[in-house]
Structures are given as C-alpha cells and as structure tokens.
Image (cartoon, rainbow, N blue to C red):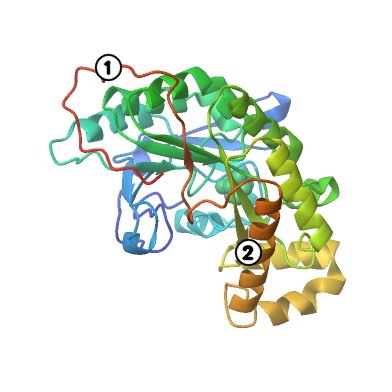
C-alpha cells in the first residue's frame, strides 16, 4: 500500500500530500458479524482539514474526512477513485479496506486553534460517509463535533448513515452556537434496487426515519436525492414515489442529482449493470458516451420533474449543494474561545 501523497478529493493529488506515513499504520479486523471481511487501517494522520481543489466551483471550500473507503459500498460511489492512490483497488477494496484517521478529533482541535484558521464552513460526508459502520466502533464524530462546537465553527454533514442519530444531542448543542446543516442522501425508495446497488447502507426508509426524527425535534434536514439512476429510478412514477416519501418524512428541501460515472466508479458500476441489468448496458454507454455526466437535456428534465413534484408536495428545492441549517431551539452564549469569522453556506 502507498500511504504517502494522498489526496482527499481525487482531483488534485499534489494538493494535500503526505497526510500520514507508512510507519503510522496499524491493521485490525474484528470478529463481530457487522465487520466480517472488513480490514481497518488505523493511521495517525498529519492533517485533517482539507482544502477542496477548485473550491470556487463548489459550495464549500474545506472538508474533514475521518475515513477513507466506505462499507456502505454503493456501486456508483464517486470516491472509489481515491482508493487507487493507496494502491488499493476501487472495487471491493474500497468497500472493505477502510482507513481510519484515529487522531482526527485532536488534529481538528489543533487546526481550529491555529491563528491562520479563519473559521470557515467545514463540510463532512462529501468524500466518504462519516457515519458509515466503522463510526459505531471508532466514535470519531463526537470528538469532531465537540471540537467544532468549542470554536463555534460552522459545519455541515451529508450522510446515508442512521448512526447520526446517536449524536443528536451533540449536534443540537453545536447548533446553539453556530450554523449546522444536515442532509440525508436518498436517491430512490425502490427496495429491490437498494439491495443491489447500495448493499451496505441502511434502507431508504430507515434514512427517511432519520429525517423524520430530526423534523420531530424541530431540526431541519434536507434530502439530497442522489443519485437518480437513468432507466432504473427515473420513471415518473418512481420519482413521484420518492419525492412523496421525502415530503412525508418532513424534509425541508429536496435536491436531485443524476448519476455521474467518473473513472474508478464507472468500471465498477458498468460491471454491476452487466450482471443485474444487461439489457441496459448499451443505453448507458450511449447516455454516457461524452464522458462522466449524462447529457444536459437529461439532467434538466429530471431536475424539472423533481422540482415540480417537490412543489406539489410542499417542499422546496435547496440551493445546489446547500444542506439545510439546524435552527437552535433557544440561544446559548458562545463558548469562551476566540470567535472565528462565521460563514454560512446554509
Ligand atoms: S455512502 Fe456515500 S461514500 Fe459511502 S459508498 Fe455510498 S456514496 Fe460512497
């Protein structure tokens, strides 16, 4: 495995080199059924706050990712490519060889305390899911949320993991002193499709229960309806069923995103397609003939359909990529730390 010159995003490998050294890796497996076949590589990272290359095109500039690889194992996952930088493959290794940055909370405390840090928004769950199963054992997120709360640093989390509800109290406390955004990803509600294409994730209905629970506590949660899978989840009736379920769960917004197939994910997804839906292979090859993205006309059509349905069911689309903000139930005095400039993307 190659542990140097590691990029979080996969867009610019030179940008955040040398996150940790080879001597810092401890490899572990666990006997419990939920971790069968999974190997954890515990590392002491050298840095944790990453600047997003090409940030001017993104709704966020800074990210924190305590894990690499994801046991949620979504076949289409765009982060698969980043595993190749570790000399691991972008298929099964991505699903089962998980890098855990065990010192993430202490590193984040250090970075947030730096005089150079300007208190900008930090996005989590943008590369791999920070509430994947590993988090149940390693419990890195409570320390991360606390570090952000102590500095009143705005942040957002995007997840498919129901484990986020474990940290509900911590998130609510953080929201009393800064902007906190939560979004849950639910691309479709078809159970059969979910079992094969997102085999390690909680079922869509369980994810919508997260939205429901948050809404019940007065906490706004948006849904990223991603990915919409051409010819598999884009029928009008399917889109309607999904948006209706999202609305019924009490989501504050729904943001559709059509599947994109970058190198690393593309090969894995197309092999899955050939196994499960061989009659669609040619149609996908034609739709993605120009590259990683479906044609604009197709993306626009899906977006318009979802927005129309969202209006019909009484929920609004979010601004692109913007998770909704937790609204604190009552104000609380900010902690006694130097107050950073707060930028809200929500
Ligand atoms: S949950 Fe997100 S990060 Fe994890 S495999 Fe699925 S798409 Fe990738």
For label 2, count other residues whose C-alpha is less than 10 Å away and answer few (under 14), some (14-19) or many (20+).
some
In the displayed structure image, the side of residue 101 where residue 287 appears, left or right: right
Q: Is residue 200 visible?
A: no
In the displayed structure image, the side of residue 28 where residue 180 appears, left or right: left
| Structural distance between the alpha carbons of marks 2 and 1 | 41 Å
In the displayed structure image, the side of residue 151 where residue 9 appears, left or right: right
Badge 1 residue CB within 8 Å of ligand 1: no
Query: In which quadrant of the rendered image does the C terminus lie?
Result: top left
Where's residue 148, x and y in %? 33, 29
Q: Is residue 243 visible?
A: yes
Where's residue 194, x and y in %? 77, 48
Q: Nearer the viewer, residue 182 or 331?
A: 331
- On the image, which quarter does residue 250 sit in? top right
Q: Nearer the viewer, residue 161 or 82?
A: 161
Q: Residue at x 41, y 52 (%)?
A: 8
Task: Please name the residue that numbered disc 1 is placed on.
Answer: 333
Task: Please name the residue that numbered disc 2 is placed on.
Answer: 303
Q: Secondary structure at mark 2?
A: helix
């Amino acid at each position: 495995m190659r542990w140097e010159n590691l990029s979080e995003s996969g867009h610019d490998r030179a940008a955040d080199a040398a996150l940790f050294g080879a001597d810092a890796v401890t490899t572990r497996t666990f006997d419990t059924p939920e971790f069968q076949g999974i190997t954890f590589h515990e590392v002491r990272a050298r840095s944790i706050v990453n600047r997003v290359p090409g940030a001017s095109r993104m709704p966020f500039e800074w990210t924190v990712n305590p894990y690499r690889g994801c046991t949620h194992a979504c076949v289409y996952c765009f982060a698969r490519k980043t595993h190749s930088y570790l000399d691991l493959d972008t298929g099964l290794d991505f699903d089962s060889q998980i890098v855990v940055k065990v010192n993430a909370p202490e590193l984040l405390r250090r970075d947030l305390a730096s005089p150079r840090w300007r208190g900008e928004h930090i996005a989590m769950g943008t590369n791999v899911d920070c509430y994947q199963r590993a988090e149940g054992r390693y419990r890195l997120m409570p320390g991360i949320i606390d570090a952000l709360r102590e500095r009143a640093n705005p942040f957002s989390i995007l997840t498919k993991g129901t484990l986020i509800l474990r940290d509900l109290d911590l998130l609510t406390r953080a929201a009393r002193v800064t902007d906190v955004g939560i979004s849950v990803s639910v691309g479709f509600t078809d159970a059969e499709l979910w079992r094969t294409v997102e085999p390690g994730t909680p079922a869509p209905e369980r994810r919508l229960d997260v939205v429901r629970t948050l809404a019940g506590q007065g906490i706004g949660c948006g849904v990223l309806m991603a990915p919409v899978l051409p010819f598999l989840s884009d029928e009008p009736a399917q889109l309607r069923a999904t948006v209706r379920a999202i609305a019924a769960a009490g989501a504050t917004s729904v943001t559709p995103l059509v599947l994109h197939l970058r190198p690393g994910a593309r090969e894995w997804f197309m092999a899955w397609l050939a196994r499960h839906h061989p009659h669609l292979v040619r149609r996908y090859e034609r739709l993605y003939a120009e590259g990683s993205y479906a044609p604009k006309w197709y993306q626009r059509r899906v977006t318009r359909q979802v927005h129309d349905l969202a209006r019909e069911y009484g929920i609004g689309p979010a601004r692109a990529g913007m998770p909704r903000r937790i609204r604190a139930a009552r104000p609380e005095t900010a902690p006694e730390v130097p107050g950073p400039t707060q930028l809200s993307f929500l």
